[in-house]
Image (spheres, grey):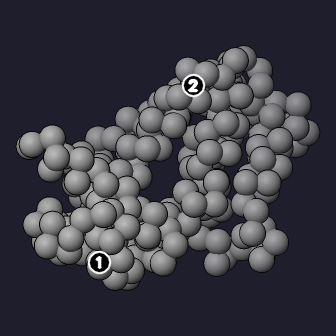
Amino acid sequence: MRADARRNLGRIVEAAAAVLAERGVNAPMEVIARRAGVGVGTLYRRFPDRQALLAAVGDHYVHSMAEALDQAADEAADAWSAIRAFVSWAAEPGRAALATALAALPDEAYTGRDGFARTRDGWLERFGELVGRAQEDGAMRRDVGVEDLVHLLNVFTCHPDRLPAPVAADPGRYLRLMLDGMRAEGATVPL
């Protein structure tokens, strides 16, 4: 792929992610093309239909989650701090809005893609390793697993319509409160 075509592809996916976060999965393709600074024809040459574009955005999203988790693990002083940093990153408003938009899609829109599945599985494995390290360090409850964190992220970032309005308005705050309950010293009663 030529360098300019690769740049256009990247701009389109980034623009689509931003527009979907703002307007949902039915946002007009013309708006996405305009935001990317390309013509509609260029958009459709790269992505023949909305489904192909949404799959690319899903891939982009899971790759960004994997990269953010790796960055948090590299930069944090310990595993627990990395978990907190990653959860805060995932709950940032624009990112949570994109997660909400992607959650509205049927799973087969992107989950059946090999690249998506590989990246998601790798991300989950690394997240699980961080949880294990935080538990070994004595920072995190042993009766909480990576699945619990994934479910919380899913509820708080993908389904804000199921939350009370104050919680949906600031999911990061409530996720951090819940994380405090996952600290080892917060384990007063076994789950």
What residue is rendered at 46% in x and 77% in y? 24
Closest to the observer, 152 or 64: 64
State if disc 2 and disc 1 touch (CB < 8 Å). Answer: no
Tell me where residue 61 appears, x and y as whole percent.
41, 52
Instruction: Check residue 181 in the rendering and tell me which mark sits there, or answer none.
Output: none
What residue is rendered at 33% in x and 41% in y? 119
Q: Is residue 151 above or below residue 108?
A: above
Instruction: Tell whether 72 sits left or right of 2.
Output: right
Closest to the observer, 23 or 128: 23
Closest to the observer, 146 or 27: 27
SS class, disc 1? helix
- Mark 2 lies on residue: 73
Q: Residues within 10 Å of mark 2 (few under 14, many from 20)?
A: many
Instruction: Check residue 29 in the rendering and tell me which mark sits there, or answer none.
Output: 1
* Cα gap from disc 1 to disc 2, whole angstroms: 36 Å
Q: First in sequence, mark 1 or 2: give its number.
A: 1
What residue is rendered at 82% in x and 30% in y? 184
